[in-house]
Amino acid sequence: MLKIDYLISGGLITNYNCSSKCKHCSYASSPNWPNDYITLTMADKVFQLLKGAGCDYIHIGGGEPLLNPNRIFPILESARAHNIGVDYIETNASWFKDEKSTIPILKELMKRGVHQLLISIDPYHNEYIPFYKTKGLMKACKKAGMGVFPWLMKFWKDLDAFDDRRPHALEEYARKFGEGYLRELPKRYGLNFKGRALYTYKSMMELEDFDKILRYSTPCGLLTGVHHFHVDLYGNFIPQSCPGLSVKLDELLNGANSDKYAIFHSLDTFGIKGLAKLAIGEYDYEPKEKYAGQCDLCYSIRKYLALKRKLNLPDLQPVEHYKFI
């Protein structure tokens, strides 16, 4: 049985739909996703479950949770009704138009208990979002009294070296700062090589023999970690260590059937060796000789099950994660 008795800190994914398709996104968000947003009924349920599990504070992210700001207001009211504090809302600033239209939105957020925005500042987002929007949102926050959590200020000078009225491809950064810039970018960002980030960078990773990967397999204990987990708009518990894996939050807190969640259970208990054995024995997965580490092997198996075999498995939800990587 899969079970978590308490939760400490996590986030709510209000939507996977996003204005950008960033190369570093571990959640594989993009404009291709359905325009779904967490319902008030689901928000009430999630906040009640989180509170019951001892989680008093969350952050909110996406996708881009503020693509349509009016959709988030009732969700914030629900959080307040359940005595769940919101540390910050993550945003890429793409929704910013001007101060006149933005400041009233910020004040509505503040009325509902949100007093800080985490605003993305990095070359990955700048491929889709002109830097003037980031600057403009930060200035509007200052005027409205909204706190700003800039992520990450170390990239400010890099972005500011370009015309801030238009987006800039990563290749432009390489031409301006040298080819080594792109090699160092993941390290400077502190990138988690999961989801789309893995597929962006796996060609730069060292390949390992399939047998060697299995030989050093250990249980993926972080899958049931109680810090920096996420719960998405469909009520799925998404572990910090691996987007694309899921267990219904209510089932996980009450005790989820390990047979129902065989993929999740095999990784949590035996690691990649357990998942590979399951995939080969039950689903005719044919491994390659080499992979860019155990995460590459894991994603290869999961994509095979979700897309090639078209298996509607409860622990590989939502399936769009694999479609839109």
Image (tube, rainbow, N blue to C red):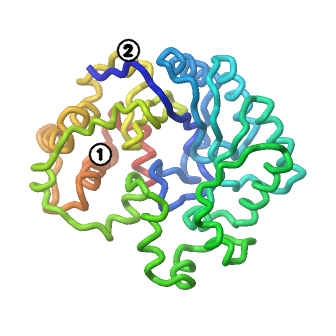
Q: Quadrant of the C terminus?
A: bottom left
- Residues 277 and 254: in front is 254
- Can you say whether 191 is above or below 223 in the image? below
How far across and how far down the image is residue 201, in percent? 37, 65
In percent of the image, x 64 and y 67: which residue is there? 156
The residue labelled by disc 2 is 254
The residue carrying mark 1 is 302
Under mark 2, the amino acid is Asn
How many C-alpha atoms fall within 10 Å of the one at disc 1: few (<14), some, or many (≥20)? many
Q: Earlier in the sequence, mark 1 or mark 2?
A: 2
Q: Is residue 105 left or right of residue 324?
A: right
Q: Nearer the viewer, residue 224 or 63?
A: 224
Asked if marks 1 and 2 touch (Cβ < 8 Å), the reply is: no
- Under circle 2, the secondary element is helix
Residue 113 on image: x %, y %: 73, 30
| Figure disc tally | 2
User: What's under tag 1, amino acid-wise?
Assistant: Arg
Return the x and y of residue 147 as percentages of the image width and height: 73, 45
Q: Quadrant of residue 167?
A: bottom right
Q: Is residue 12 above or below residue 147?
A: above
In the rendering, which numbered label is found on residue 180?
Answer: none
- Tell me where residue 161 sits by quadrant: bottom right
Q: Is residue 124 above or below residue 52?
A: below
Q: Residue at x 62, y 61 (%)?
A: 153
Relative depth, front residue between 128 and 77? 77
**What residue sits 47% from the left and 27% below the top?**
8
Please determine whether, in this image, residue 214 is positioned above or below residue 10.
below
